[in-house]
Amino acid sequence: MLSIALIAHDRKKDEMVNFVTAYEHVFEGHKLYATGTTGTRIMANTKLDIHRFMSGPLGGDQQIGALVAKNEMDLIIFLRDPLMAQPHEPDIIALLRLCDVQGIPCATNIATAELLVRALDRGDFAWRELVHKYKPGIE
């Protein structure tokens, strides 16, 4: 079971709901996290149980980032709106930076999300289980 975060900017929320609905059978075997409204909308349209954090601008991106920093997140699907300025852009950049630091796969558009979810469905994320198995303890 992997930990997966689902985040979508306002103009991408419908796209996220449609995407998760299409791949509900893949997501149902994993622990799901989302920012506030995105998680609420996904749960209203699927049978998935999602741990919801605050809305992104209110700190939800940072809450997910905290899990990434501890290498406790395995995959992030973050459908960003590249044509709209975001008031919490520094939080978004920090989250993406943490994904790069920890080597966490992060899709920021639907095309990449599709590739990662198909890989997840095939079992190509087994390497993340090894990351957790051999994760060093806090000293």
Image (cartoon, rainbow, N blue to C red):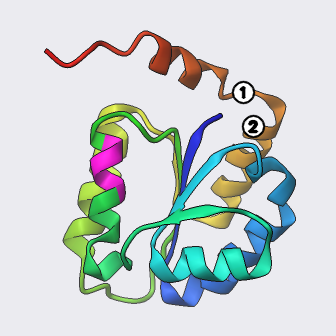
In the depicted structure, whether residue 68 falls above or below residue 132: below
Query: Under tag 2, what secondary structure?
Result: helix
* Residue 65: % across, % down: 31, 53
Query: Under tag 1, what secondary structure?
Result: loop
* Residue 93: % across, % down: 27, 62
Query: Residue, x 45% and y 86% (percent of image)?
Result: 83
46 sits left or right of 88 in the view: right
Instruction: Name which residue type carries label 1.
Output: Asp
What is the chief secondary structure element of the magenta stretch? helix
* Residue 121: % across, % down: 81, 39
Q: Mark 2 sits on what residue?
A: 119
For the C terminus, which image quadrant? top left
Whether residue 85 is visible: yes
In the depicted structure, whether residue 115 falls above or below residue 45: above
Instruction: Name which residue type carries label 2.
Output: Ala
Query: Residue, x 24% and y 57% (percent of image)?
Result: 94
Q: Mark 1 sits on what residue?
A: 124
Residue 101: mark: none
